[in-house]
Image (cartoon, rainbow, N blue to C red):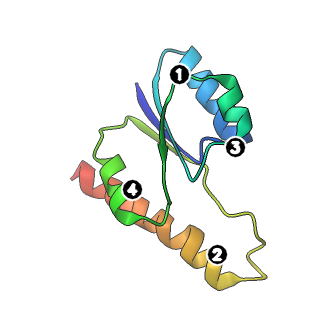
Amino acid sequence: MRCLILGGTGFLGVNLTNLLINLGNEVTVFSSGANKDFLDYGLKAKFVCGDFKDRNLIDSLSRNGFDYIFHLISTTKPSNLDPYSEFTDNVLPTINLLESVKNQVN
């Protein structure tokens, strides 16, 4: 199966990538940047670096016919300190992702 892991260079993403590859899946990892742990694993995954808020990039990714998309992206700042950033950095891009995937299914 073809899998896309959004936020795939964090702790959960690296371990999920490793598991999915070991199970024989084709994995694409999307992140704002590679971390040392991800690079040290030497995982056989396609890597796409970009900004989750870039709607054109997310639309482009969603057109690749993935069987599964794992959404592990979020900012690390507490939302109660900056609710506007929470919305613009996490909520709105997630809605855009869901809309993009929905449009690919129809």
CB contact under 8 Å: marks 3 and 2: no
Residue that numbered label 3 is attached to: 10
For the point 63% across and 31% down, the residue is 16
Residue that numbered label 2 is attached to: 86
Tell me which numbered mark, 4 or 3, is placed earlier along the sequence.
3
- Where 85 sits versus 2, above or below? below
User: Mark 3 or 2, which is nearer the eye?
Assistant: 3
Badge 4 amino acid: Ile
Report the quarter where the N terminus lies.
top left
CB contact under 8 Å: marks 1 and 3: no
Badge 3 amino acid: Gly
For the point 41% across and 59% down, the residue is 98
For the point 58% across and 68% down, the residue is 90
Tell me which numbered mark, 4 or 1, is placed earlier along the sequence.
1
Quarter of the image where one finds residue 58: bottom left
Pick whichever, 26 or 32, lies toward us: 32
Query: What is the C-alpha distance between the residues marked 4 and 1?
Result: 22 Å
Residue that numbered label 4 is attached to: 58
Badge 1 amino acid: Lys
Query: What is the C-alpha distance between the residues marked 4 and 2?
Result: 19 Å
Question: Which structural element holds mark 2?
Answer: helix
Question: Which structural element holds mark 3?
Answer: loop
